[in-house]
Amino acid sequence: MIVYVALAVLAVLVAITIIATARRWQSAKAIAMVVSKETTSDNRSSTESLLALGGKASAEEIAVERAAKAVHSATIGGADSSSTATSKKSAAKAEPSQPPDPETIGVNRRQFFNRTIVMLMGMSLSGFGAACIAFLWPQGASGFGAKIKVGLVSDLLNEIRDNNGFLYKPEGRMWLTEYPNGAVEKAIAAYSDSELAGMTAGQKLGLSSGIVALYQKCPHLGCRVPSCPTSQWFECPCHGSKYNQVGEKRGGPAPRGMDRFAVEVTADGSLIVDTGTIIQGPPIGTNTTGQEAEGPNCIGQVDASH
């Protein structure tokens, strides 16, 4: 979303810059036309004077002729005529008109296009840089990889039972199952404190059981492990690995039990699952609940000795 906003702002800035530059160029062009007309008028006056003297006279000849006329006028007209002759002589010695200064006229077409291209390139690079910064800027984490407040433990236990013992939460890619209070003592010797926080929640809150938050991936090759409603186990369809209801390995090629997430239980009884902290599953042979298959397996048969 931030990237789209940055691109929209960039487009507006480019449009404003182009319009402003075009107006400036038109204004400069108008000034150049006025200066050019004045220069042409001065040149035309000089040309007419040359033609009046014969069209082939040089600048020196023109000056001599004007000086002679001035002397003649001074002889006939007196002092007033002498002033007039002096003015004409000064005009004769005036420097020829010079071409207009490019800085006065403004930018020409080539300069306009060159500057516009450079400006657009700069704006494009700036927009690209802003988009990269927006993409890399840390955002408020939510969903998988963050801490998720799943709900009250009591409510979650009811949902698990309503879903035949297995509750899937797609936002955290996790399975939630019950952990019996009677197995807590064995769990203390096999699991870490961050795992036990959910397992012991039943005892601490006065409920019939605690909760386990299991990662959905099979530790063998990463397939998503579904639940089996008949056996009440997790059974991987890829290579047949099987786990009891709390994710402890019961058969197949998996190297350990299902991985799980660190959990917290707040003072009000809410379960918070840290999906950014994945804890490796228990080693082969761990079976704290003693749960056996409660019915036919969904994926072939299992050899519980593995």
Image (cartoon, rainbow, N blue to C red):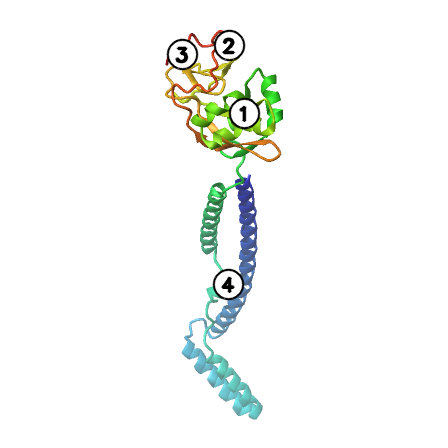
**On screen, residue 163 above or below 190:** above
Residues tagged 2 and 1 counted as in contact (Cβ below 8 A) = no
Question: The disc labelled 4 sits on which kind of residue?
Answer: Ile
Decide: few, some or many residues near mark 4? Use Cα within 10 Å; few <14, some 14-19, many ≥20: some
| Disc 4 from disc 2: Cα separation | 94 Å
| Disc 2 from disc 1: Cα separation | 20 Å
Q: Earlier in the sequence, mark 4 or mark 2?
A: 4
Residue matched to label 1 = 211
Decide: few, some or many residues near mark 3? Use Cα within 10 Å; few <14, some 14-19, many ≥20: some
Residue matched to label 2 = 294
Q: Is residue 39 visible?
A: yes
Q: Earlier in the sequence, mark 2 or mark 3?
A: 2
Residue matched to label 3 = 304
Question: The disc labelled 2 sits on which kind of residue?
Answer: Glu
Quarter of the view holding residue 34: bottom right
Question: The disc labelled 1 sits on which kind of residue?
Answer: Ile
Placement of the N terminus among the 4 image quadrants? top right
Who is closer to the viewer here, 105 or 36?
105
**On screen, residue 275 above or below 88:** above
Residue matched to label 4 = 105
| Disc 2 from disc 3: Cα separation | 14 Å
Decide: few, some or many residues near mark 1? Use Cα within 10 Å; few <14, some 14-19, many ≥20: many
| Disc 3 from disc 4: Cα separation | 93 Å
Q: Earlier in the sequence, mark 2 or mark 1?
A: 1
Placement of the C terminus among the 4 image quadrants? top left
Q: Nearer the viewer, mark 4 or mark 2?
A: 2
Who is closer to the viewer here, 199 or 298?
199
Decide: few, some or many residues near mark 2? Use Cα within 10 Å; few <14, some 14-19, many ≥20: few
| Disc 4 from disc 1: Cα separation | 81 Å
